[in-house]
């Protein structure tokens, strides 16, 4: 009997190891769950457990029988670990940040999702840098990094690739990408991305044709890098002014998406040349532009973006950079084919869609289709290969509002969550919008769900739920 018990234990742990959620949007960043989760769930139905958790926007990182999250508790940034079976807290560790970085009024300084290689758990806070723990909470190494220069806070999550922790720190001044040895925290390589402005997109590993490419979406451009040394492989223009959504792929089709104010052809934000604007608006004749010297409108409301170094004054260089970004930004969902080098914008874009785009919500691919939801609850689906609409801008009834959580798919279903906490379950096999269920959690949701072994792990502003049949 002892031998049978041992065999059962080994088999159970092996099954768990095959069904993990090791980073933002799960294995490979694809948003693909496992098992058969419930379609209908609430605090009264199909609830396995619920626990109170510290405030934060990071999504669950799950390995075997443990769940890792980050949050802000008693003024401290923490990484904490829960038992997957019942939600019981196992440990928490404090990040030694001297000061908590600013965040958007609906944001959080604990937004990046942890990642793991199974042995090491990696947490990243803009307020401090990178910390590595084992799954029992022992600190293995730490790497302080400068606090990013962006008043909305850090959101891009770390990923692990080729034995390295990849951190993309796109910001208004001094953007860079760094790779740290996952075992030691030693810097493996660094890429200067100073031409890029603020971005919140998590990097993605595109696996195809026996190779792996590190894909990073940024302002105006998406670029591919070699995971071994960080050298650039190709670059594609056609991105929005700020990158929020993350790339996703289905085999040899890479999908990129970006939307931001001023990037639609019929809704451009135009800035006149600096010389004429300065002559008309520089009230104190100091050659610089304060916020009070901008007339009311879309540019003044984005003064903190134009003022890259946050010194309260806009220089000619800062003005012209933003003017150029407004002029060239493109809002679109588009597909890239593999095999390019250099600028592939004119040669490797397979198709694009420019209407009804998501803002922060990262699309998901299911049943050969890519599913998106625009703010207001407008759902669309397109054929992955051709970009042809299956349905477009169909309203999700009783699920309006913004969508900050990204989609997850499993068992021919797509789970999308509104900021207001309404989870709509879509039939991925239907040729029209078919909502299988609407589940109202009656609480704000910014974190993306994780679905592992048929259990949905979903974080609201105060609780972590586990739903399963």
Image (cartoon, rainbow, N blue to C red):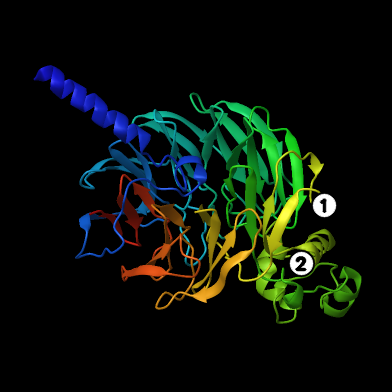
Q: Would residue 91 be found to the left or right of residue 130 on screen?
A: left
User: Could you tell me residue 107's position as x and y percent?
Assistant: 48, 62
Q: Nearer the viewer, residue 260 or 425?
A: 425
Q: Nearer the viewer, residue 104 or 383?
A: 383
Q: Residue furthest left?
A: 1
Can the viewer see residue 249 in this picture? yes
Q: For mark 1, does the 10 Å Cα neighbourhood hold few (<14), some (14 to 19), or many (20 or more) residues?
A: few
Between the C-alphas of marks 1 and 2, the distance is 21 Å
Give the mark, 1 or 2, whose residue is nearer the N terminus.
2
Say if 326 sits above or below 257 in the image: below
User: Could you tell me residue 86's position as x and y percent?
Assistant: 20, 47
Q: Name the residue carrying label 1.
A: 346
Q: Quadrant of the C terminus?
A: bottom left
Tell me the residue at 45%/47% (across/down): 113
Q: Residue furthest top?
A: 3
Mark 1 or 2, which is nearer the eye? 1
User: Could you tell me residue 447's position as x and y percent?
Assistant: 42, 57
Q: Helix, strand, or loop for circle 2?
A: helix
Say if 340 sits above or below 245 in the image: above
Q: Quadrant of residue 227?
A: top right
Numbered circle sitting on residue 421: none
Q: Would residue 108 be found to the left or right of residue 232 on screen?
A: left
Can the viewer see residue 239 in this picture? no
Q: For mark 2, does the 10 Å Cα neighbourhood hold few (<14), some (14 to 19), or many (20 or more) residues?
A: many
User: Could you tell me residue 399's position as x and y percent?
Assistant: 42, 74
Q: Name the residue carrying label 2.
A: 326
Say if 318 sits above or below 344 in the image: below
């Amino acid at each position: 009997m002892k031998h049978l018990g041992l065999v059962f234990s080994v088999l159970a742990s092996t099954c768990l190891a095959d069904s993990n959620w090791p980073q933002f949007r799960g294995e490979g960043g694809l948003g693909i769950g496992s098992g058969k989760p419930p379609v209908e769930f609430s605090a009264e139905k199909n609830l396995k457990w619920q626990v109170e958790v510290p405030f934060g926007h990071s999504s669950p990182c799950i390995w075997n029988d443990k769940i890792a999250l980050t949050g802000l508790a008693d003024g401290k940034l923490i990484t904490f670990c829960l038992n997957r079976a019942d939600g019981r807290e196992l440990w928490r560790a404090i990040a030694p940040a001297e000061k908590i970085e600013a965040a958007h009024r609906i944001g959080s300084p604990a937004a990046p999702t942890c990642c793991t290689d199974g042995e090491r758990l990696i947490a990243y806070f803009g307020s401090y840098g990178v910390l590595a723990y084992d799954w029992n909470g022992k600190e293995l190494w730490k790497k302080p990094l400068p606090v990013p220069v962006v008043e909305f806070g850090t959101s891009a999550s770390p990923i692990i690739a080729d034995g390295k922790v990849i951190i993309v720190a796109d910001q208004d001044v001094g953007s860079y990408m760094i790779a740290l040895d996952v075992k030691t925290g030693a810097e493996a390589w660094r890429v200067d991305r100073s031409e890029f402005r603020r971005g919140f997109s998590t990097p993605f590993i595109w696996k195809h044709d026996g190779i792996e490419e590190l894909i990073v979406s940024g302002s105006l451009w998406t670029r591919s890098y070699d995971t071994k040394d960080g050298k650039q492989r190709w670059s594609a223009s056609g991105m929005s002014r700020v990158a929020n959504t993350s790339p996703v792929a289905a085999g040899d089709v890479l999908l990129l998406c970006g939307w931001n104010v001023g990037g639609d052809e019929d809704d451009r934000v135009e800035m006149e040349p600096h010389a004429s604007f300065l002559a008309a608006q520089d009230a104190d004749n100091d050659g610089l532009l304060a916020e009070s010297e901008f007339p009311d409108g879309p540019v003044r409301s984005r003064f903190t973006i134009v003022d890259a170094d946050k010194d309260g004054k806009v220089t000619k260089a800062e003005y012209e950079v933003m003017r150029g970004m407004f002029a060239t930004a493109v809002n679109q969902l588009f597909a890239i084919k593999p095999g390019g080098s250099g600028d592939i914008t004119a040669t490797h874009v397979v198709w694009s869609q420019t209407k009804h785009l998501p803002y922060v919500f990262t699309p998901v691919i299911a049943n050969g289709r890519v599913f998106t939801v625009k703010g207001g609850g407008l759902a669309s689906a397109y054929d992955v290969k051709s970009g042809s609409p299956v349905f477009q801008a169909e309203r999700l009834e009783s699920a309006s509002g913004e969508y900050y959580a990204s989609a997850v798919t499993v068992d021919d279903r797509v789970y999308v969550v509104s900021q207001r906490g309404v989870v709509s379950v879509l039939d991925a096999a239907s040729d029209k919008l078919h909502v299988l269920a609407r589940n109202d959690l009656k609480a704000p949701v910014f974190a993306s769900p994780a679905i592992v072994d048929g259990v949905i792990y979903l974080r609201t502003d105060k609780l972590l739920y586990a739903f399963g049949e």
